[in-house]
Image: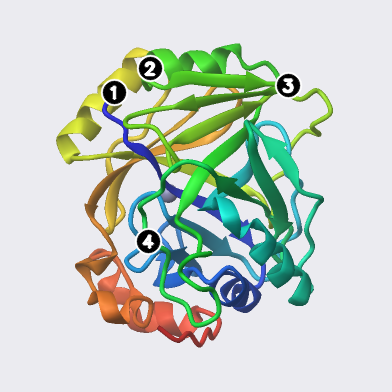
Amino acid sequence: MNLLGLHHITAMASDPRANFEFYTRVLALRFVKKSVNQDDPGTYHLYYGDYIGSPGTALTFFPWPGLRRGRPGSGQSYATGFSIPAGSLEFWQERLAKLGVKTEPVTTRFGEKVLTTFDPDGLRLDLIATNEADPRQPAPSEDVPAAHGIHGFHSTTLGVVSPAATVSVLTATMGYRLVATEGHRTRYTVGAGGPGTYVDLLADPALPRGLNGAGTIHHVAFRTPTEISQVEAHGQVARSGLPISPVIDRAYFKSIYYREPSGILFEIATDQPGFTIDEPAESLGTKLGLPPHLEPHRAEIEAALPPLTTKP
Ligand code: ZN
C-alpha cells in the first residue's frame, strides 16, 4: 500500500471557541479551515495545522457544544504526538505553565523527551522533542518563535488490548514496518519514515477502556499520494476482509474509511487538492468552507451554526 504517513487526526470537542483559542493561541497552530461536519452540517469541522494545513499537520475537531467528556483509553487513538525540536522542551514547559495549561512530568520515549499536555476538553497531546531532522516549517506565530514551533504530527499512539490483529492490519495490509519496542509500546513507520509517519501501539494492561466523547479521538487518517493509489489501497483493505467505505469526496481530500480490529476508525485520504481549493493561502480559515453538495444550503447552514469569530 502506498502510504506516506499520517494525514490528519480528528477529535471531538465541546466548546468551539475554547477549542479555537487553545490551538491557535496556546499551541500556535494556524486555523486553516472552518467547515462543517459533512455527516452533521449543524456542527463545525475546525482544522488547525501549518500555514496551509499540509498533510501530516492537521488536527481537526468536531465541536458539539455541551458534549460530555469521554475517556482516552484502549480501542482508541489514545494520544496525539506533535514534533518539536530537541531543544524546545523547556520553552514549552515554561509557556504552558505560564498559561496555566496542565502538563504531566516529562517522560522519555525511545530516547526522546515527551511533554504531555491536554486541551480544554482533556485531549491528550504529547509534545515530542525529537532528535530527528524535521524540515517541515511551523505555522508563523507572534508568540512562538519558529525555532520552537510545532512542525506537525510526530505520531499517533493507539491503545490496544491485544495487538496481534492490529499489527497484522498495519504491517501486512498497510505496509507499516516495525521500528522498536519499549515496555508496552511498539513503534511502526511507513514510507520514508521520520516524524509524521509513526504509529505507536500501546498495549498497556493499565490503560482503561476508552469512552467516546469530548477530548477523545474520532479517527486517524493516513496519507496516500493520489486517487489511483487510494483505489489500490481500497482493494487491499477489502481483500484483507475488513469492511470499507466507498470513496467519499471531502472537498479538501478524498477519503475511504475502515475500522481496524481493535475498533479504531482509520481513514486513507489523498494529499490533493488541499485546503487552498476554496480559499487563498493567505486567508485560509476566514470563510465557511462547504463541499459543493452543501453549497446550495449555505444560508441555512450558516444561520444554524453557533457564532465563531476567527482571525486569519
Ligand atoms: Zn478524516
Residue placed under numbered mark 4 in the picture: 137
Quarter of the rendering occupied by the N terminus: top left
The answer to the question of whether label 1 and label 3 lie on touching residues, with beta carbons closer than 8 A, is: no
The answer to the question of whether label 2 and label 1 lie on touching residues, with beta carbons closer than 8 A, is: yes
**At label 2, which amino acid type do we have?**
Thr
Residue placed under numbered mark 2 in the picture: 173
Q: Name which of mark 1 and mark 3 comes first in the sequence.
A: 1
Left/right of residue 154 with respect to residue 230 in the rendered view: right
Quarter where residue 248 is shown: top left
Question: Distance from label 2 to label 4 (Cα)?
Answer: 31 Å
Residue placed under numbered mark 3 in the picture: 183
Secondary structure found at label 3: loop
Question: Distance from label 1 to label 4 (Cα)?
Answer: 27 Å
Q: Nearer the viewer, mark 1 or mark 3?
A: 3
Residue placed under numbered mark 1 in the picture: 1
Q: Position of residue 214 (x, y in %)?
A: 69, 57
In the rendered view, tell whether residue 75 sits above or below residue 181: below
Q: Position of residue 51 (x, y in %)?
A: 35, 69
